[in-house]
Image (cartoon, rainbow, N blue to C red):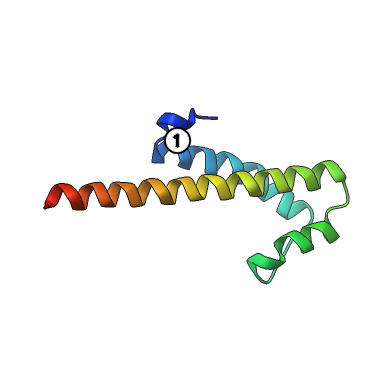
Amino acid sequence: MPQSDNISIAQIRSELDRISNELVPLIQKYNLDASSALDVIPVARQSISKPEDYIRFLELSLEGRIYGEIADHLQRAERATTANTEH
């Protein structure tokens, strides 16, 4: 996991790839298919039979969400910096 004070978009992408590489097999193993983002947790709760897999699914989902929000924040900051330097 990268240090939080100097994280780059490339590092975030790498972490998201790592998360996906672990999450996709869980999704396939339990044939998880939610019709909307709001249904993901209830579907996982009903479908995942092993408690350790369910916990890992939740951990990976949360990590992915956090990294996604960090990436969004960094991209906005970069755009703001670029906009400020162009004026």
Residue extending furthest top?
3
Crowd rating for badge 1 (residues with CA inside 10 Å; few <14, some 14–19, many 20+): some
Locate residue 44 relative to residue 61 in the image: left or right: right
The foreground one among 12 and 74 is 74
Above or below for 8 versus 83: above
For image coordinates 73% across by 54% down, the residue present is 28
Give the quadrant of residue 33: bottom right
Q: Is residue 76 left or right of residue 23?
A: left
- In front here: 62 or 57? 62
Residue depicted at x 74% and y 59%: 41
Q: Position of residue 61 (x, y in %)?
A: 65, 49
The location of residue 66, given as percent across then percent down, is: 56, 46
Which percent across, then down, holds residue 10? 40, 38
Residue under label 1: 11
Question: What is the secondary structure assignment of the residue under circle 1?
Answer: helix
Q: Does 9 appear above or below 44?
A: above
- Judging depth in this view, the residue of 48 and 28 nearest the camera is 48
Q: How many marks?
A: 1
Q: Hey, what amino acid is under mark 1?
A: Gln
Looking at the picture, how far across and down is residue 7, in whole percent?
A: 43, 34
Give the residue at x 33% y 47%: 77
The residue sitting at the bottom extreme is 35
Q: Is residue 84 above or below residue 36?
A: above
Q: Residue placed at 21% from the left, 49% from the top?
A: 82
